[in-house]
Image: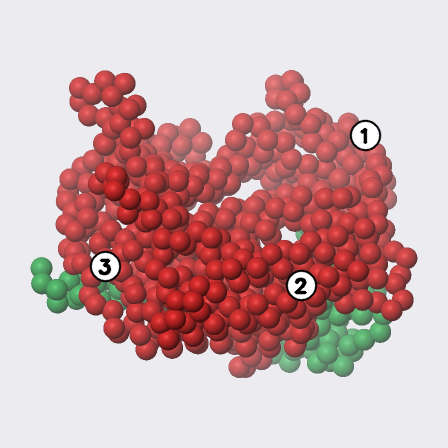
Amino acid sequence: MTRKGRRLTLIASMLAVLGVAAGLVLFAMRDSIVFFYGPSELAEKALSPGTRLRIGGLVKDGSVVRGENKSISFVITDSNKEVRVAYVGQVPDLFREGQGVVAEGVLVGPGQFRADSVLAKHDEKYMPREVADALKKQGVWNDGAPAPAASK
Amino acid sequence: MITEIGHYALVLALALAMVQSTAPLWGVWRGDVALMATARPVAVAQFLLIAVSFAALTHAYLISDFSLLNVVENSHSAKPLIYKISGVWGNHEGSMLLWVLILALFGALVALGSRAMPVDLAAATLAVQAWVGAAFLFFILLTSNPFLRLAQPPIEGRDLNPILQDLGLAIHPPLLYLGYVGFSITFSFAAAALICGRIDASWARFVRPWTLLAWIFLTLGIAMGSYWAYYTLGWGGFWFWDPVENASLMPWLAGTALLHTAAVMEKRDALKIWTIFLAILAFSLSLLGTFLVRSGVLTSVHAFANDPARGVFILAILVFFIGGSLALFAWRASRLRQGGIFAPVSREGALVLNNLLLTTCCATVFVGTLYPLALESVTGEKISVGAPFFNLTFGPLFVPIMLVMPLGQMLAWKRGDLLGAAQRLMVALAVGFAVALLFGALRGGPVLSIVGVAIAAYLVVGSFVEVYGRIAARGVTLGVAISRAMGLPRSAWGTAFAHAGIGVTLFGLAATGWGVELVQTIKPGDQIALGPYQLVVGDIVKRPGSNFDATVAPMEVRSGGVVVATVNPAKRFYPARQMPTTEAGIATLGLGQVYVSLSQQNPDGSLDANLYWKPWVTLIWIGTLLMALGGGLSLSDRRLRIGVARRARAPAAQPAE
């Protein structure tokens, strides 16, 4: 094979691999990307039930209800709008009322959410950044002590 | 006083790094050997100064010197000794100090081990290394100084984040950094080669051992991090496609590609431009990882800092080095002459395919990791790209790599015999099919798992077909075969073990499909059937630790009524930070593990627990150890030993292979 032929082979195989990769990426992007909203944004968007989402905010004080078989329900709030979340499974060590939380799952109706995973913070100072941003946006950010400052 | 010495040593190290980054380059420019010769002693001295600085910080942690802000924020006098030491790098400032320590260590090692190298190449390499060092020393001194004092020291520190109070912290970051930062030296070699215009097979010979060394540590570091996450986070997961993990996977993929093309360059003087590019890419991705992890753009347990000034500073370093090296590359790479030619079906051709696939894998990880950040900064929309994305993109691209891997080993340089190689692989293919049938018939379960173990078996057997062919043939006695096996170049064994390691890891990954998971409430006396075992819950007890209180639920693991192991899952509470953690109870039985983690205690005293039986799960990490072993074997090959070129010049030349 000539040098030119070799080069063509190389370029052709390169394009083939990159093409496949680009196809896979686009395909996966369409199906497996999850948007993040705070409760207020969620209310504005009017998404159809069944949409996969991540929602974040604070766990509303007094809203946690534990049921049978590790089922748990709580309200995520940004002190403007609220979303009720139902979840079955273990909640993280640092899941508490009044603290930041992110839930991933499916919208079942207006203001109703079924989570299949719940994330809380890693330590006493940490808060998921999306939550901190959402709270800032809603003007309920509190810089005082036990500040949900995103550090550590 | 010792603290001040440490601080001062760090400033001196910066001054030396600045000398080291300019004087030798000036020497290269002017052809002045004396100026070039300054690089070596200065590199060693710079390392020693940073080592003094690091020792001073460690000393402050050991004596719990709470007049240092860094110690106050991350230590506690009641903390066990090992965590006082590892706590040094369990925070942003200390971990950056470890970063530059390792950077300078590699510089010093090159300075000491590079006597065989052309003097201008060594000088330019050390100068580039010092540029990186100076940038990060500036970063530490200006934005992340660990030696800041407090006017009014508190009596007690705030303790280290309990999640980090683990043996993993003592092992994972140093290993990972040795790998991550180790690629700095290949980067420096590449930039030096471009500066000196000296890019040939001997350059590849100098670079290969360093690449291998960095790759071995990165492999071990990633594996250790994965195992740590597995046992400490309590979900039984070992890889989450978290951006921070991806940040370490990307340099690994680029480094693996580099390792393979450097072999082509060394043997055949081909693929030079590509090799240089990969050397730049691998370290650029390491820098990108440092930026992602250290700047606070991502939040994770790794993101200690969230000071915007730091993020901007690291971003500036990133842009400078990546932009600078790529500009240098664009300017100088065109001067390279074409190297050896080869047919598409050949060892080189297979390695090109390997590179193509590895870099494409790397690119998909890159897209998945950075797309959310880019989208958010452009549109403000927040998205998360999770495991499904990576499984869909990375998986299909990695499978062909594994299928082609044994084939590539079998092809000859320059022009290979595809049919012959495929015929010799029939054994491996047959074993793969047999394994698939066996698992399909005996265990059933998910198709993906069965395909996975089949590919794994094919890969493990296929990796050794080549060495088997070289040591055993019809009529060869065992004694001859053993002596031939001993006589084979270590790098041949290295390749076989490293490739087989991928297969072993794949087996462990595939076997997760046969795992058993239970979520239930437990109380003393409960009997729980878990996979092939029965768990019997003992009395739930409180046990105080050195700086925490624990609630432990001991359990016996029984098999057919016989106790084969015990597990002690626990909930811990750290009063200093008012923070609970989960300690999983793990029993290794054969190659599988019983894994129990507790969540909260109910008012009636019972506990909620996650219980898992994970068959063959340890193979995931055993495979990575095999990969590292393969790397080590290759590194010990006499052709690759650092400084071998000098000995080879001696009259008794090495026998040709």
In what quadrant of the picture does the C terminus of chain B appear?
top left
The residue identified by callout 2 is B9
> Quarter-wise, where is residue A72 in the image?
bottom right
As helix, strand or loop, the secondary structure at mark 2 comes to: helix
x%, y% of residue B122?
40, 61
Which image quarter: residue B564? top right
The chain letter corresponding to red is: B
Can residue A77 be seen?
yes
Residue with the mark numbered 3: B270
Instruction: Tell me the element at label 1.
Output: loop
Chain that is green in the image? A
User: Label 3 marks which chain's residue?
Assistant: B
- SS of the residue under disc 3: loop
The residue that appears at 46% across and 67% down in the rendered structure is B127
Q: Are marks 3 and 2 in contact (CB under 8 Å)?
A: no
Q: Is residue A140 above or below residue B502?
A: below
Q: For marks 3 and 1, give the CA distance.
A: 67 Å
Nearest to N terminus: mark 3 or mark 1? 3
The residue that appears at 70% across and 80% down in the rendered structure is A137
